[in-house]
Amino acid sequence: MIETIVIVTIVTASALYWVRRLVPASQGMFWRGSADMLRAVHAPRALRDRAAQRALQGDKPPSGCGACTKCGDGGGCH
C-alpha cells in the first residue's frame, strides 16, 4: 500500500513538472482551479489570495527563456 502511494506521488509530481515546463499556459488554469477549490473549502484568506495572485501571474505570456543564461546568444536557448 505504501509503495503505491509513493509511486503515485512521484508520477503525479513528475507529470505536473513536465506539464508546467511544456505548457506554461496551463499554470493559470491550475492556480485558478486551486483558488476556486480553496474558496469552496473555506481555506484561510491568505492561501486563497496567494492562489488567486498566482493565477493572474500564470496568464502572462512567458518572457525570454526562463532560466536560460545564453538566451539570444547566437543560437537561442539551450
Image: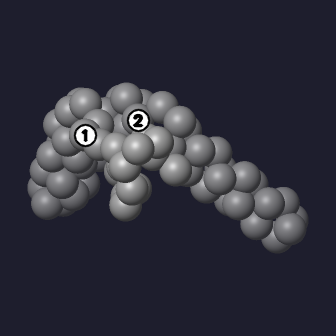
Q: Is residue 63 visible?
A: yes
Residue at the extreme front of the image, as rendered: 74
Q: Is residue 52 left or right of residue 66?
A: left
In the foreground, 8 or 76: 76
Q: Secondary structure at mark 1?
A: loop
Mark 2 highlights which residue? Answer: 24
Regarding mark 2 in the picture, which secondary structure is present there? loop
2 vs 59: above or below: below
Q: Residue at x 79, y 60 (%)?
A: 7
Identified by mark 1, the residue type is Ser
| Residue at the spot of label 1 | 63
Residue density around tag 1, few if under 14, some if 14–19, many if 20 or more, within 10 Å? few
The residue nearer to you, when weighing 71 against 64, is 71
Compare marks 1 and 2 and give the one earlier in the sequence.
2
Q: CA distance from mark 1 to mark 2?
A: 11 Å
Which residue type does callout 2 highlight?
Pro
**In the rendered picture of this protein, how many numbered marks are placed on residues?**
2
Tell me where residue 15 sits by quadrant. top right
Q: Give the farthest residue toward the bottom.
A: 2
Q: Nearer the viewer, mark 1 or mark 2?
A: 1
Front one among 62 and 4: 62
Q: Residue at x 86, y 68 (%)?
A: 3
Residue plotted at (25% across, 31% down): 61
Camera-nearest residue between 78 and 19: 78
Tell me residue 64's x, y (percent): 29, 43
Is there CB contact under 8 Å for labels 1 and 2?
Answer: no
Q: Quadrant of the N terminus?
A: bottom right
Left or right, residue 2 beside residue 54: right
Q: Position of residue 74 (x, y in %)?
A: 41, 44
The spot of residue 16 in percent (x, y) is 56, 46
Other-residue count near label 2 (Cα within 10 Å), few / some / many at <14 / 14–19 / ≥20: some
